[in-house]
Image (spheres, rainbow, N blue to C red):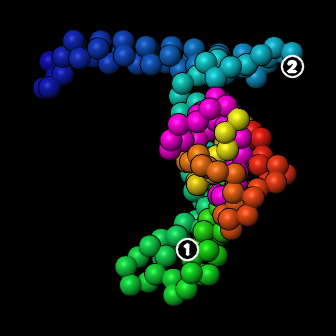
Amino acid sequence: MFKGWSWRSFWKERVSARQSRSERMQRAAQFRRLLEMAPGETMTVASIPPELRRRLQEEAIRSAFGRLEMPLRFLLNATTPGREPESIDMCHEILRLWRQGLEREIRLEPGDAPNTLRRYEPSVDLEYNVHGRCRPGDSLRVLIPCWRLNGQIVVRGEAEPVAAMTSLSGSPVSMGQVTSSV
């Protein structure tokens, strides 16, 4: 008998190797079925093998961060103590660059621009945290825009009710300045 060798460990390794090989064969067969699907058939996320789905998600995240490298560097420099931007215009420029990066590279779409007025509807609660009570038809001022990805809200914005129908300058607001839901 060999030192450090046993039949039990030998058979355990053989059985585990067979199981992992059969699992790999099953995953390969699932992937082949996915590739051979007819164009009319529907494919869901559940029909993608979990290992492949995880790998695709990881690659998507890596590539998104790779494309956002420059805006991330600007944002990092702007928030480093002692290296803050010298003017408010430079701050706006960095934020504009960051917003463009989010819109172009990740395809995040901003909602209404800050200080935009819009009518309150119950569906607005899905897009914005409203600071105050509102009834349908009341005016809201968008404080922070919401962000959408593929039409779905991924970051809720913030809004507040407007007490009187006046603009930020104090003049009455025309109905053309109040927008309905996006």
Q: Residue at x 58, y 36 (%)?
A: 134
**Above or below for 48 versus 86:** above
**Above or below for 97 versus 86:** above
Q: Which residue is mark 2?
A: 39
Q: Quadrant of residue 45?
A: top right
Image coordinates for residue 152, horizontal then vertical, percent: 67, 35
Q: Quadrant of residue 124?
A: top right
Check residue 96 for magenta coloring.
no
Question: Which of the two residues, 21 or 6, is positioned nearer the viewer here?
Answer: 21
Check residue 135 for magenta coloring.
yes
Instruction: Determine whether, in the image, residue 86 is placed left or right of residue 110.
Output: left
The answer to whether residue 145 is seen in the rendering is no
Question: Which of the two residues, 152 or 10, is positioned nearer the viewer here?
Answer: 152
Whether pointer 2 and pointer 1 mark residues with C-beta atoms closer than 8 Å, the reply is no
Image coordinates for residue 151, horizontal then vertical, percent: 72, 37
Question: Which of the two residues, 171 or 48, is positioned nearer the viewer here?
Answer: 171
Give neighbour class at mark 2: few <14, some 14-19, many 20+ (Cα, 10 Å). Answer: few
Q: Secondary structure at mark 1?
A: helix
